[in-house]
Amino acid sequence: MSARAFALRAFLSNQTAAFPDMKKFEPGFAERRQTSSEAKKASLAKAKEASKDPNAAARQQARADLAIVREARRAERKAERSAEKKRKALEKAEADAARRAAREAEAARIAAEAAAAEAEKKALAAAQKAERDRRYAARKRT
């Protein structure tokens, strides 16, 4: 037994020793059983009283109608969430396609610039060769 449990047991035993008259205020088993039985009977009587009420069927029907309306709202919200999810997925797909098209256009622009630079480089090389050939031919004539 732990020291804490031992101390608690000692405290409780001292309490009953210090207040011996408290025993008569504590309900015994029979009294607790009687109280429980009375509570059950009262609950049963209340339920029987409620079942005899002429408005009970109307209240029950109203609760059922509310449950149907609540379920319809829940289904409507679920459909709205589903539609919103589909709309967002479509927007995301469109945005991805736009980004992909932009990347491809940028890659095509870079490739075109590289091809133009290569063509310019070849043209410059051809012009330089022509100039060299012209100078060489001029030297040969003289």
Image (cartoon, rainbow, N blue to C red):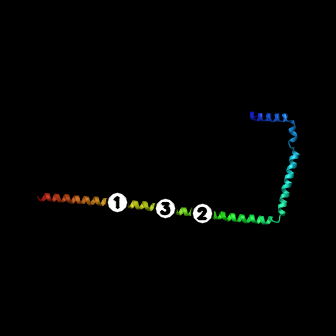
Q: Which mark is residue 113?
A: 1
* Three-letter amino acid code of the residue under disc 2: Ser
Give how far apart the Cα atoms at labels 3 and 2 are.
Answer: 20 Å
The residue identified by callout 2 is 82
Q: Nearer the viewer, residue 100 or 133?
A: 100
Q: Earlier in the sequence, mark 2 or mark 1?
A: 2
Give how far apart the Cα atoms at labels 1 and 3 are.
Answer: 27 Å
Q: Earlier in the sequence, mark 1 or mark 3?
A: 3
Q: Which mark is residue 95?
A: 3
Residue at left offset 16%, top offset 57% = 136
> Is residue 37 rendered to the left or right of residue 85?
right
Label 2 packing within 10 angstroms: few (<14), some (14-19), many (20+): few
* Three-letter amino acid code of the residue under disc 1: Glu
* Three-letter amino acid code of the residue under disc 3: Ala
Location of residue 30 in the rendering, given as x and y in whole percent from the top left corner: 88, 46
Q: Quadrant of residue 63?
A: bottom right
> Is residue 86 rendered to the left or right of residue 37?
left
Label 2's element?
A: helix
Give how far apart the Cα atoms at labels 2 and 1 are.
Answer: 46 Å
Location of residue 27 in the rendering, given as x and y in whole percent from the top left corner: 86, 44
Residue at left offset 82%, top offset 61% = 50
Whether residue 2 is visible, yes or no, is no
Please tell me whether residue 77 is drawn above or below residue 22 in the rendered image.
Answer: below
Label 3 packing within 10 angstroms: few (<14), some (14-19), many (20+): few
| Front label number (1 vs 3) | 3
Q: Nearer the viewer, residue 11 or 132?
A: 11
